[in-house]
Amino acid sequence: MTDRYVSLKIVFLKISNIDTIREEYLADIFLSARWREPALDNNKETQKINWESYFDPKLNIQNNIGELKQTTWRELQTEAGGETYVMERRRIKGKFFEKLELQDFPFDIQDLSILITSESPPTDVELVELNSTVSHVNVDSFVDQQEWGLYDFVVGEKRLMPNEYSSVKYKRPGFIFRCCAVRRVGYFTWNIMLVIAMISSLSFAAFSVDRELPQRRLQLSFTLILTMVTFKFVASQSVPKLSYLTYLDRYILLSMSFLFLVCCWHAVVALYKSDDDTAGMMDYYAFFAFVGVYLFGQVMFVVIVGTKKKLESLPTWDRPEKRKKKHKHFMKINPFT
């Protein structure tokens, strides 16, 4: 049985510099920890307390990068029945690591998390969420509003973390707080995907070249393919090197595949020089077939992305079938309470 319960609350005061390539972000947070201390019942002289003589949950931030700038202070809270609780407050500024799931890039929704652990075993300490006040995010101070949108709630979840620094094989209690950011797709839609769509649609212009000049048609098609490859490298600079395909990768690869098929057609139709009428009809129907395939592919991509965005408008830990405790916080609240 757990000896002590440590209640946690977090306030994301400021979030900035969400870096997709390095998978990190900057945050200014306020962390509160509260636990029962029977030895301090009816003791109101906080300044004279030697905190080293009393229980310490030894809380640490697990997913920080580099040194954190933090200020820590403690105070006592006495309930109506005389029970005394220790309230530890921390103001923390630093850089935090966040493993980004980029399968849906650039239509992705990302968790921004803070992982808190205790050096004590789970039999001594259990980390829980503070129920008296809710954790929340100060969305008004969000810096990256041009690139990201920020949800206004925080979700907490208990974890058991492995103890890497001890020969004793026990897990450490942990608690993870998550807020949620959704990427604004305007930049990638207008500057990459729209340009890719225009380049791939230019493949139809090659059909206006005389069919008896296949070298001209192939030259135009090869130029478009090389242009598409250049844009593929440009898009790759926006995400880390991944072992899987993002939505943007799929769109570009499908567009390149379409150009490849058009290029193959121009090479094949040149073999039918002996029968001009048959080749002309084949080329005529091929043009409309490629137009139909192109339009169908564009519509299907929009439908698939739109449907998936609607189903995943909230992260996996907050969907209806897996819903935990969702904090809606619309009032101005003092984060230091």
Image (cartoon, rainbow, N blue to C red):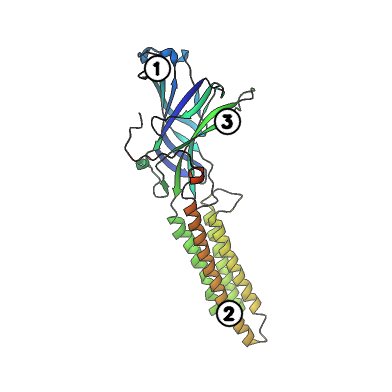
Please give the residue where the numbered disc 2 appears in the rendered image.
Answer: 285
Please give the residue where the numbered disc 3 appears in the rendered image.
Answer: 161
Side (left or right) of 85 relative to 297: left
Secondary element at image label 1: loop
User: Image quadrant for the C terminus?
Assistant: top left
Marks 3/1 in contact by CB < 8 Å: the verdict is no
Which sits earlier in the primary sequence, circle 3 or circle 1? Answer: 1
Q: Residue at x 47, y 47 (%)?
A: 314
Query: The disc labelled 2 sits on which kind of residue?
Result: Tyr
Side (left or right) of 217 relative to 128: right
Q: In the rendered view, would you say 281 is above or below 153?
A: below
Q: Position of residue 125 (x, y in %)?
A: 52, 23
Q: Nearer the viewer, residue 20 or 73?
A: 73
User: Image quadrant for the N terminus?
Assistant: top right
Which circle marks residue 55 in the picture? none
Marks 2 and 3, how far apart in space? 63 Å
Q: Quadrant of residue 335?
A: top left
Q: Residue at x 44, y 12 (%)?
A: 39
Q: Position of residue 123 (x, y in %)?
A: 56, 22
Query: The disc labelled 1 sits on which kind of residue?
Result: Glu
Count residues near mark 1 (Cα–Cα under 10 Å), then give few for <14, some for 14-19, many for 20+: some
Count residues near mark 3 (Cα–Cα under 10 Å), then give few for <14, some for 14-19, many for 20+: some
Q: In the rendered view, would you say 268 is above or below 134?
A: below
Q: In the rendered view, would you say 200 is above or below 30?
A: below
Q: Position of residue 159 (x, y in %)?
A: 54, 32
Residue 13 visible (yes or no): no
Which sits earlier in the primary sequence, circle 2 or circle 3? Answer: 3
Q: Nearer the viewer, residue 116 or 141?
A: 116
Q: Residue at x 66, y 87 (%)?
A: 275
Secondary element at image label 3: strand
Please give the residue where the numbered disc 1 appears in the rendered image.
Answer: 83
Marks 3 and 1, how far apart in space? 31 Å
